[in-house]
Image (spheres, rainbow, N blue to C red):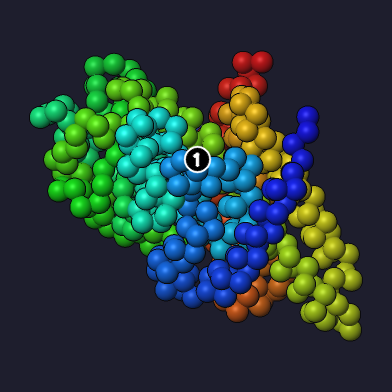
Amino acid sequence: MDFSLSEEHELLRKTVRDFANAEVKPHARKWDEEERFPKEIVPRLAELGLLGIRIPEEYGGSGMDTTSYAICVEEIARVDGSLALTVASHNGLGTGHILSFGSEAMKKKYLPKAAKGEWLAAWALTEPGSGSDSAGLLTTARPERGGYVINGTKMFITQGSVGGFCVVLARTNPEVSKQKGITAFVVEHGTPGFAASKHLEKLGCRSSDTCELTFENVWVPDENRVGELDHGFTDTMKILDRGRISIAAMALGLGYGALSAAVSYSKDRKQFGKSISEFQAVQWMLADTKTELDAASLLTYRAAWLCDQGKQYSREASMAKLFASEASSRACNRSVQIHGGYGYTREFPVERHLRDAKICEIGEGTSEVQRMVIAKHVLMG
Ligand SMILES: Cc1cc2nc3c(=O)[nH]c(=O)nc-3n(C[C@H](O)[C@H](O)[C@H](O)COP(=O)(O)OP(=O)(O)OC[C@H]3O[C@@H](n4cnc5c(N)ncnc54)[C@H](O)[C@@H]3O)c2cc1C
């Protein structure tokens, strides 16, 4: 199986790395401390095609593949987990749902604005009472006046207040099994009754916008329905499969960023008359980290390659996300350890990497949920 990267992919990696180093890295610490979504970087993301990565050129996007999507997210995450989360979720979840399941009219209306960064996309599945058990959602959409009236609360929604539109999952049929009666709708910001009711303060990814959203008698026309009626949960599982590749890529970027910081610090820092990189205990931490991250990279780009080939990749996406996210947390933790007391301060970026990496074990399905998905596939044979 050949899923090595092409010259085009390598060129894209270099372009995004150069951008991230020059225009994101210098600000990442400040954005994190201010816990402020950096709106000023959005036009640059759009110019570079990073807000329409998989959107076909006919809708104003970059028309790239899933491997490219992973590369873009990984490279941004090397310097800033928050911005990587923005790029991952905007491309994969909100716009991804419309791209995969929306009508032609819907694609023409939303995708060009999404690619230009005029409208960032949010995607609302999780609720205060339903996370891992996502089909247990309570938000409802009932038919009325040629459209639907949506009521409910969504929790932890990325781009919840800075987005231009939100794809929201709601129950349209309470009579059937809980996975079957769910439908997706696009709701634009400014629609009466739709509000970002609470901005959530977080451990990490603090400059990514995360909100509670409320829907109080929000009417949307039938043309805002994304995909078939009552089919939204099946579509959602497909959206999450690809999304998990991007979270694996984000974990990789954070891990490699932390490793690179650990390598340079270990060469500079002297104790007992030598660089700490000369101590075997430190070398073993670097060796374990590099080995685990490269293994995670192979899993991640295998899943992306399978997706690009039109093959089944659900199990591989879960394996990539599970392994990469846990390897990333270990990598960041070891990097803090190698930095000693300085690593525990905000003077060095590794404490931010450690805080940011934790979300990769939780978002788009926790590690426990990934193990459930993988085990199901393994047992099916
Ligand atoms: C920063 C951030 C951004 C997010 N962005 C979005 C977004 O844009 N859109 C969106 O819809 N959601 C988003 N989420 C929500 C995220 O996907 C959920 O937090 C995640 O799926 C877990 O759900 P939960 O928080 O309700 O935890 P729970 O489901 O309550 O889980 C709590 C614990 O119980 C474990 N657990 C639950 N069920 C089982 C089981 N059957 N077996 C074993 N263990 C189990 C979990 O693994 C976890 O350890 C975001 C979350 C965060 C923190």
Farthest bottom residue? 273
Q: Residues within 10 Å of mark 1 (few under 14, many from 20)?
A: some
Q: Residue at x 66, y 78 (%)?
A: 342
Spot occupied by residue 189 in the image (x, y as percentages of width and height): 25, 51
Q: Quadrant of residue 376?
A: top right
| In-front residue for pair 24/248 | 24
Find numbered disc 1 in the image and state the secondary structure of the residue it sits on. Answer: loop
**Is any atom of residue 225 visible in this view?**
yes
* Residue 372 shown left or right of residue 236 in the figure: right
What is the number of callouts on the image? 1
Q: Is residue 80 above or below residue 101?
A: below
Q: Is residue 58 above or below residue 37?
A: above
Q: Is residue 115 above or below residue 219?
A: below
Q: Quadrant of residue 227?
A: top left
* Residue 115 shown left or right of residue 228 in the figure: right
Farthest front residue? 58
Q: Residue at x 24, y 21 (%)?
A: 173
| In-front residue for pair 379/296 | 296
* Residue 264 shown left or right of residue 78 in the figure: right
**Is any atom of residue 362 visible in this view?**
no
Q: Residue at x 70, y 48 (%)?
A: 8
Residue matched to label 1: 56
Which amino acid, by three-letter code, is at mark 1?
Pro
